[in-house]
Image (cartoon, helix red, strand yellow):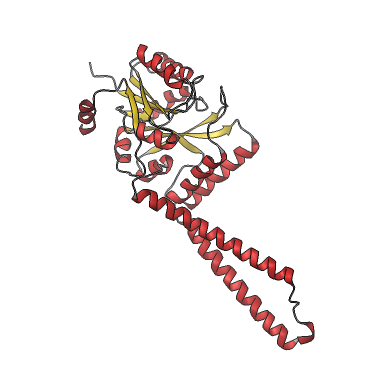
Amino acid sequence: MPAKRLISIVSPCYNEERSVNECYLAVKRVFDESLSGYEWEHVFSDNCSTDDTVAVLREIAARDPHVKVIVNSRNYGAFRSMFNALMKTRGDAVLAMLAVDLQDPPALLVDFVARWEEGYKVVFGIRKNRKESFLMRSARSLFYRLVQFSANINIPTDAGEFQLLDRQVVEALRHFKDYFPYLRGMIANVGFKSVGIPYDWGVRRHGKSGANLFQLYDQAINGLISFTNLPMRLSVFAGIFLAGASLFLAVLSVVAAIFFPQKGVPQGIVTLLVAVFFFSGIQLLFIGIIGEYVAATHAQVRQGFAVFEQELINFAPAADRRQDQGR
């Protein structure tokens, strides 16, 4: 009898003591009821939680060897933590990110696996309906479309990291050495045959998201600069346009002074101040855009990606893991 194929699930978490057990049970239920023909492992990557998340995960891992836990030495953010855990999976297919808040439905994994068995290397979820505020829903929709429009590769619209990846794709991702992994862009960049499945993105069952406004901004900027030079090129075009407009207005002022001296353009202080502040703001904006690229390059050159682990639970010894990676 051939060995069962292994499916891996990655769940980054931070201060989710009320959610991790529900997430584990939901995944276990899917494999017990609908995917019993597969082996599975559920890798939780904890970002140095300050509540009892790790204690709950220890209890789960102690009674179920399917569960593996990575305890990071500090909070590296969901994306670094997720990518680090992704690289430690052993599955023939890997669900790159299942958020423990269960906004992405674990039951959809059944459809993902079915399409993977049909030969698709990447099966991604498309968030058609979002159960969140109108402002956040609109902002996310605008961001996804801006990234898709500006990127030099085809990044699926309304698709997050809730994607099932074939082992071949995971190994291809291993070649990236990105200080801030923008996983959906990286997956699109490596190519391979892919298909999307629409679903409803639900609401959190417990607590609230740990991502603040600054972190959301950081993620958005990273997505924009990772696979496109559009912001810098827009800065160049805007600079050319403003320089041309300024030259045109200067010529008009000279013409007016020569031919209509009695109706010369008033030299008002308010006009001068508005012009100074306007162009100063434009310059600061452009410098900020350039700064984002410089900061990204600086972090990349210094190899700032590394995630340091405090503890590994239910993982094979290091020698065995190296042999698995070699195979």
Q: Whole-percent x and y of residue 53?
A: 46, 21
Name the quarter where the C terminus is drawn: top left
- To which quarter of the image does residue 262 belong? bottom right
Q: Give above or below for 177 relative to 89.
A: below
Residue at x 29%, y 36% (from the top left corner): 168
In terms of image quadrants, where is residue 324?
top left
Q: Give the total of numbered labels.
A: 0
Q: Check the image and report above or below for 61 versus 165.
A: above
Residue drawn at (32%, 33%), measured in percent from left and top? 87
Does residue 119 show up? no
Residue at 56%, 25% in the rendered image:
204
Residue lying furthest right = 262
Q: Residue at x 53, y 49 (%)?
A: 146
Residue closer to the observer: 45 or 237: 45
Question: Residue 62, position in %: x, y?
Answer: 35, 13
| Picture coordinates of residue 215, whole percent (x, y) | 52, 40
The image position of residue 238, as x and y in percent, is 56, 64
Q: Quadrant of residue 200?
A: top right
